[in-house]
Amino acid sequence: MSTNKLFNTPGTFVTGVNYWASHAATEMWSKWDEKVVRKDLKILAENGTQMIRVFPLWPDFQPITRLFVGDGRAFEYRFGEEELPDTEAGRAGVSELMMGRFEKFCDIAAQNNIQIIAALITGQMTYRLYMPPGLAGLNPISDPEALMWEQRFVRYFVRRMKSHKAICAWDFGNECNYMGKAPSAAAVSVWMNSITDVIKREDPERPLISGMDGTALENTIDHPENPGHSYWSASSQAECCNILTTHHYMMWKSAGSDPCDTIKPGLFPVAEAKMYGDITNKPCFIEEIGMWRPMIADFETAGRYLRMLYWNLWANSNGGLLWWCAFDQDNQDIAPYDWESPGVEHGMFGHDFKVRNTGSEMKKFRTFLDKLPFKSIPRSEADAVCILGDQRQKSGNIAASAFILANEAGINMQFAHARKAIPEAKFYMLPSACGKAGLSSKNWEILKKRVHNGASLYISIDDCYLQGLTELSGAEVRTRAEKGGETTYQFVVGKEKISVKLPSPILRTIKVNKAEIIGSDDNGNPVFFESKYGKGRVYYLSIPLEKLMMDKPSAFINKESSDAWKIYSSMFTKELSEKIVSKNNPRLSVSEHKISEKEMICIVCNNSPVEVNESLQLKSGWKLESAFSSDKSTAKTKHGLQLHIEANSGLCLQFSSQTT
């Protein structure tokens, strides 16, 4: 794959892993064993690995020590007791021995047709901070002495390795937003721009990947639930990086409340990556994902979880997934693996090379993609723009919840940020709006004007105080009180009446001015309204539906609340009627990818742990030409469009138009 198209060509998908050697994990460079590495990469290649992320451990590659004079002043840097050689490597404080090993590693990867993302400053790894002995105790982000040596290391490493064909991209390092504590957003910006400038001066061709865990969308004031990490916003990363990343581990996210083979864990990481990509206008892929397997899933279930992720990511034009990690690390008795926090059974393969179900699924999906008659597919068109606010909203959770509900309803959404330019659209969504929904007064007026001119707006509120909301919605809050417990809400969706039982921390009584009531609580108090606003329409929900669905365990799969998606579908009747393929089962995600006026690719994903036999409605004039699967899933057209999809799997359907 051309490096300038890496993760940036819709419908292409990279499979791979994060790699530490099976015998030594973080000690792989100091305990180098070429035979083991060759065996490792061979088994990875045989099981569908196209790409690996590799970590030149910082103190191994820049093993400088600092010497002091008697009064405590720093005097010079050495390699232990040896003077730094007067060579390019020596002046950079870089070990020639380790660089030779890295070059050999790249040679072996190239022999196996595996591409490498080089995570340059690997200082933080599995909860442990690794720094050169001479820099120990310095802040690696804000201390100028540390930054000087980081620049020297990166400059030498990139200059020496940029000609190797195995390297496809550079990465800042492993989760540098957890490498020490950044004192300010300005310090973060200086660090990122400094390292970026060094990389791009030496190698302007290869993309730079952020290599970081989930962060805030925008730089904000420090937040008590996420101290310091708001300084590493996705937008600030996008100023420097060509490609953004997410590192998703469901046990530390709200997705972890549900079984891993169900819709919430299956779509949450997809929404997260899509959110960052849409808002920054940069490619974003899942660079790390994994689980504490012994406490979350058996091998078979973990395999199905990964299979579901592959299908949903591919359908949503996410460029790839690198599993954490290649091999189990349960054979390690060194720090940090013998500390309390790290899990050591994350691997696609045992340290004895036994292939886990996740490894088998990677191989199957890679084989499936490689055999398709087309190598890429266009993005699916968005039906709505979902506008997210600031950090008070927990935008990642709200984005995921809205994305799941939209997928269940058959709606495709694009994400936007309240403080950025709002894209033109026919339908806007402000889910679980908190405060002023993050909107500036200017953007709020722009949004209202577009609705007045004919667009539709859905807004659900979580103590929202946007000015003019009463006039816009046709409904007015009379009283607000803390409530607690749960409430059963009744909604009229088309010709159907549904009930949704959810927590109700707040009770609002609503006075209706000009709106039509289409939902109320179990005491008859209205909660959902539809009204006209100029030429447009406004749907106003006085409960934070998305927040409540995300916060309540199993809300998307329990009978008492799982019909919530129908609230979304009731607002999109026109958009849904224009789909070429329509579905009724909320556990199926359906995306349409238009090749031309006469050809369309449809990807159907089963987000449930059981096989599905389902009839889909096909628009008149369209014909199924081919169906492609990674397993025994099938499609037939004897009586309509009949699908059989294996648990947590998918189908790729190719249609042609028969109309002239």
Image (cartoon, grey):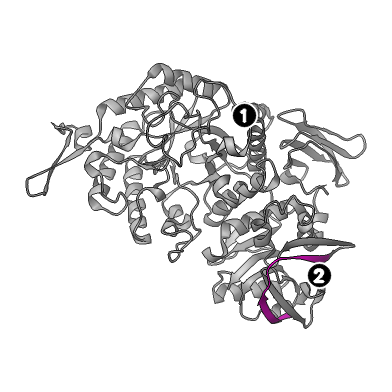
Q: Which residues are magenta?
A: 475-491
Q: Quadrant of residue 383?
A: bottom right
| Secondary structure, magenta segment, majority class | strand
Q: Secondary structure at mark 1?
A: helix
Q: Quadrant of residue 609?
A: top right
Which labelled disc corresponds to residue 595?
A: none
The amino acid marked with disc number 2 is: Asp
Q: Secondary structure at mark 2?
A: loop
Q: Residue 592's spot in the image, x, y percent?
A: 73, 46
Query: Of the residues under marks 1 and 2, which one precedes in the sequence?
Result: 1
Residue position for label 1: 366
* Position of the C terminus by quadrant: top right
Question: In the rendered image, is residue 660 in sight?
Answer: no
Q: Foreground residue, 575 or 219?
A: 219
| Disc 1: CA contacts within 10 A as few (<14), some (14-19) or many (>=20) | many
Question: In the rendered image, is residue 221 in sight?
Answer: yes
Residue drawn 48% across and 32% down? 52
The amino acid marked with disc number 1 is: Arg
Residue position for label 2: 522
